[in-house]
Amino acid sequence: TRTTMTDSEKYDRQLRLWGEDGQARLEKAHVCLINGCATGTETLKNLVLPGIGAFTIVDDKKVEEADLGNNFFLDKPSLGQSRAVRATELLRELNDRVKGYSVEEDPVTLINTKVDFFDSFTIVIATQLPESSLRKLATFLYDKNIPLVVPRSYGFIGSIRIATPEHTIIESKPDNQTDDLRLYNPFSELQAYVDSIDLNTLDSSRHSHVPYIVILIKILQKWRKEHDGQSPKTRQEKDAFKDAITAAQLNSLEENFTEAKKAAMRAWMPPSISSDVQAILKDEKAVNPTDKSDEFWILAAALREFVENEGKGDLPLSGSIPDMHSDTVGYVTVQRLYHEKAQSDIAAMTARVDGILTRLGQSRSIPHDTIKKFCKNARYLQVVRYRSLEEEYTPDPSRTDVFTNHLEPADNNVQFYLLLRAVDKFYATHRRFPGYFDDKLEMETDIAGLRSSVNSLLSEVGLPTSSVKDEPVHELCRFGAAEMHNIASFIGGVASQEIIKLVTHQYVPFNNTFIFNGMNSSTTTLAL
Amino acid sequence: MATPMEQGNEDLHDKRWTHINKVIDRNGPLAGPDFTPDTPENPQIKKLLRHEFPILVIGAGGLGCELLKNLALSGFGNIEVIDMDTIDISNLNRQFLFRHTDVGKSKAIVAAEFINKRIPGAHVVAHFKKIQDFDEAYYRKFKLVIAGLDSIEARRWINGLLVSMVKRDEDGDIDPSTIIPMIDGGTEGFKGQARVIFPRITSCFECSLEAFPPQLTFPLCTIAHTPRLPEHCIQWASLIAWEDKNFPKPFPHGTKIDTDNPDHMTFLYETAKKRAEDHSINGVTYKLTQGVVKNIIPAIASTNAIIAAACCNEAFKICTNTSGTLNNYMMYNGVNGIYTYTFEYEQKEGCAVCGSNFAKLDLAKTTKLQRVVEILTEDPRFQLKRPSLRCNGRNLYMQGMLEANTRPNLDKTLVDLNINDGDEITVTDPALPGSLYLTLKVIYA
């Protein structure tokens, strides 16, 4: 194995989530954090611990007293020193496998004068950037297909934005996966095995250990013979189908028949391909792969061909079956049939992949393990496409209802997204955040100033000024850009998790804006 | 040289608390009810936070490390932590207060040392003990308890204790000064939950017991006669081969399985593998063996960070009243995007701990007492450990000294034991600490 003995012990609990493949991708990744603030270092903490390859912190600030009260990766001896250097040192202590670098430069200047500094990173995490710099950086990274993650903590509110043109996922690993049993259209080898069993001639012990897969295929076969080739469709027919199972049951102790009744729906439901996967198959990139296509789209193109040919409308068989009441021999026999059919589907897919690559004049090949993984997870493929920050920040009257629906309930969280945008507008004008200083008079004018920034933003996006009430405006000024550790840590936790998803290409990251309301401990995700 | 009091007061105005001071020193329309911000002359909240709000953290593991860091950086100046475990290498991917050189040492002690060094003034005091080693008098001194536990049993124990510590005055009204809130966090892979419990006011942990059903083992007949999965072979090794005195093993018969003993684990792995091979079953690996026998739950730093932060955010708000609080349960699932569901978990009416502690049992007249004991231990509603049962002033089945005497009753029917329709059985159990008990009303079918 790739990881050393101590690594696989240390990483055991996380390998059970993303496996060696995921770990390998993590260890190849190099992330860049802009500004070593609490939100940033909390994000990095959760990437260093599981073994990200490397990180770089870009920050020209010196450590101040206020940093010691919210940032775990700065300590008293760090006062007056480079925040980038000290935070990097204290983060590196968490995992000696991880490389850490510090760049003592002003991120804003770097973005303005040498933005291609950022093109060597796997992911860029941007914190505390003024809007104009953030947009400049975002445009550069979007063009380079480097994901940008923007975590933020502001008083009791937190937010995260993710942006990248396209993120493909083979192993989305959804919570509610169903088994790929093909009871409706058994493949020929499975059908042959089912035909070889005559339930009526089995002794009672073997009868009560026939796997329910066999039972359901037989009952369905009999049903179709008696119903002109049709499968159960109406409520009554489905109930009658279940009765037919009961009729074949010798007694109520036969667990396999009980399981068959519970799983009956799997028999009468015709196979279907999810709308997400259908969209992938119909996508221009799958229809017309080019020599620039990445692996995912070559595989998708092969999948499209497979479905239209060998698959006869179906995806490759995933190959695994759930446990079910059965004797060992019966179960293992059935299990082997599914396994072998899956292997033969993988072989057909492999031929298609090779065919496509040859037609494109490509000498590269796609690893067998990747093709295998693609086939096994074909039902749950995902492609996530993110709108760029430029698109988000360019007012679009046709998209106003994205907001209006969310703004309905009085305690909605979208108002805080709007307030944070307004806060940035305020900053662009006043070069400081509203309510930043402890001056009562300034607070009064800042509340009015933020109200005016909010109204201007609302008008830009086509919303009435009543969309954001006065109380939250006042509250945001109360916060005065405070970065409290608990909020920073919550946001750092969420951001790091999404970064792990982006790097490992497993599980599904949110699209595209996440808001945390630390006042009532609720969250909202929306695609802006 | 400043006196401790002067040092303490200086600390109140320490510039490092600039960020949290913004919400402590300023009022706002969304602050907590009746919130009064601090003034320089009257730093009430800061004093409370730093000197007058003892807070107890239970667990110094995945959640515990995060909880200690967060509480220290929230300004709490009086923190204690209890954990009975020592540090293992598999902890190091998320329990960030520990290093390779700490393996084998006490989690609580190492964690406290680290925090106290990194964040002066946190004053974390460590206890390398079980929570059951402390009594009511100890727990009474805390204003808040935060649990970062990995065991249902421990959660029930502390929950039961805190609820039973709430006293009523002469008029029967709850004395609010005896309420110690508990914040409970739990994580598993990409999922977790954070909840706030005000004993006798909100739902308690026991109210939601059914949501945490007992661990799955496979049916014995599958394990013994018709194995199909590698997991079945592994449980055969741990439940059957291990217990069988005729099955050769390099340990004396009767040795308890120590899942941290590599020799025990190797034996289980090899035994499982042989059984699997005999049945043409693939998939037994050492890793799977560990997973099944130890009931390993996947764990990562990010989920622990999220849940711990939510918990400590609530602790900060409860103490300072700077904003409203979570009412009262947040569920979190990070598998597909980020999904949270925040809702008010209602008190369960028959809750054994904070409710009427009453349940009805519908039984056939031929039911034996043994069956009632089984229900009490197996049913997700109760999940009791070693229940003692009394009815109509008589002992039915008692643990401890009277067990041998009352054991014959297990084989008798309830009718034989003179239990009539509508009679109430009183049940006590180690899972219900202190004076808590459960009342079961018998209804004959």
Image: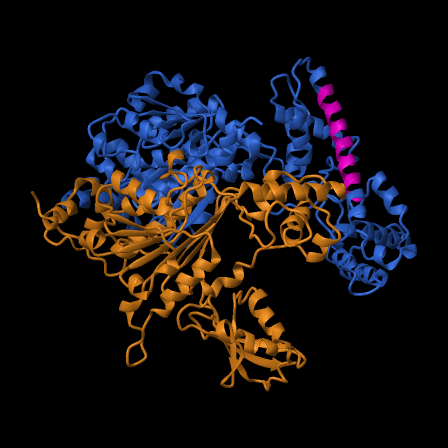
Left or right of A441? Residue B195 is: right
Left or right of B75? Residue A288 is: right
Asked if one can make out residue B327 in the rendered structure from this viewpoint, the answer is no
Exactly how many numbered labels are in the figure?
A: 0
Q: Main secondary structure of the magenta part?
A: helix
Above or below: residue B92 compared with residue B397: above
Q: Is residue B82 magenta?
A: no
Residue A128 percent location from the top left of the image: 31, 32
Q: Which chain is depicted orange?
A: B
Q: Colour of chain A?
A: blue
Nearest the eye: B94 or B372: B372
Q: What residue sits 66% from the left and 18% below the top?
A: A365
Residue A83 percent location from the top left of the image: 27, 28
**Render colour scheme:** by chain
Asked if one can make out residue A261 in the rendered structure from this viewpoint, the answer is yes
Q: Residue B167 appears in which quarter of the rendering?
A: bottom left
Left or right of B240? Residue B7 is: left
Quarter of the image where the N terminus of chain A is located? top right
Residue range in magenta is A334-355
Nearest the eye: B133 or B92: B133
Residue B34 percent location from the top left of the image: 23, 61
Residue A181 percent location from the top left of the image: 75, 45
Q: Residue B53 appears in which quarter of the rendering?
A: bottom left
Q: Residue B120 appears in which quarter of the rendering?
A: top left
- Which residue, as the protein is rendered here, is positioned at the far front? B252
